[in-house]
Amino acid sequence: MRQTPLTHSAQVRQIIVARRRSSKLSQQELAIKLGISQNRLSEIETGQAKLTIDRLLELFNVLGLELLVQERQSAGGGEW
């Protein structure tokens, strides 16, 4: 999977759904791995439930993803 700059929470949900599907996991199977209900996972994927950082990192770990933080590349290249 390529690196994707995140600018909106909807992108996180899209990544979770895409990775789950490419891993050929049902919501039920992923929910079991996370120790949550299928309904709760559905709420996460549709944005009806908020994620804590801890839960996001756990979810990414189960899906074989990692969260990287780096300085944003400036468009202008100058100082403020």
Image (cartoon, rainbow, N blue to C red):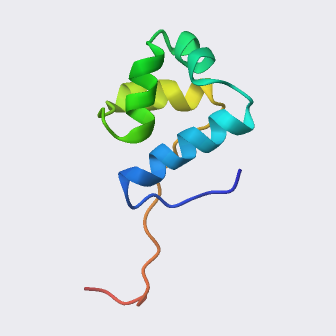
- Locate residue 48 relative to residue 58 in the image: left or right: left
Which residue is found at the position 37% from the left and 90% from the top? 78
Which residue is found at the position 55% from the left and 32% from the top? 60
Residue 2, quarter of the rendered image = bottom right
- Locate residue 54 relative to residue 21 in the image: left or right: left
Q: Is residue 56 above or below residue 4?
A: above
Q: Quadrant of the C terminus?
A: bottom left
Q: Nearer the viewer, residue 31 or 76?
A: 31
Q: Nearer the viewer, residue 45 or 65?
A: 45
Which residue is found at the position 62% from the left and 37% from the top? 65
Which residue extends farthest left? 80
Q: Position of residue 72 (x, y in %)?
A: 43, 68
Which residue is found at the position 39% from the left and 21% from the top? 40
Q: Position of residue 10 (x, y in %)?
A: 41, 52
Q: Nearer the viewer, residue 63 or 22?
A: 22
**Tally of marks:** 0
Q: Is residue 52 above or below residue 28?
A: below
Q: Is residue 5 above or below residue 32?
A: below
- Locate residue 65 relative to residue 44 in the image: left or right: right
Q: Is residue 11 above or below residue 63?
A: below
Q: Nearer the viewer, residue 54 or 49?
A: 49
Residue 49, quarter of the rendered image = top left
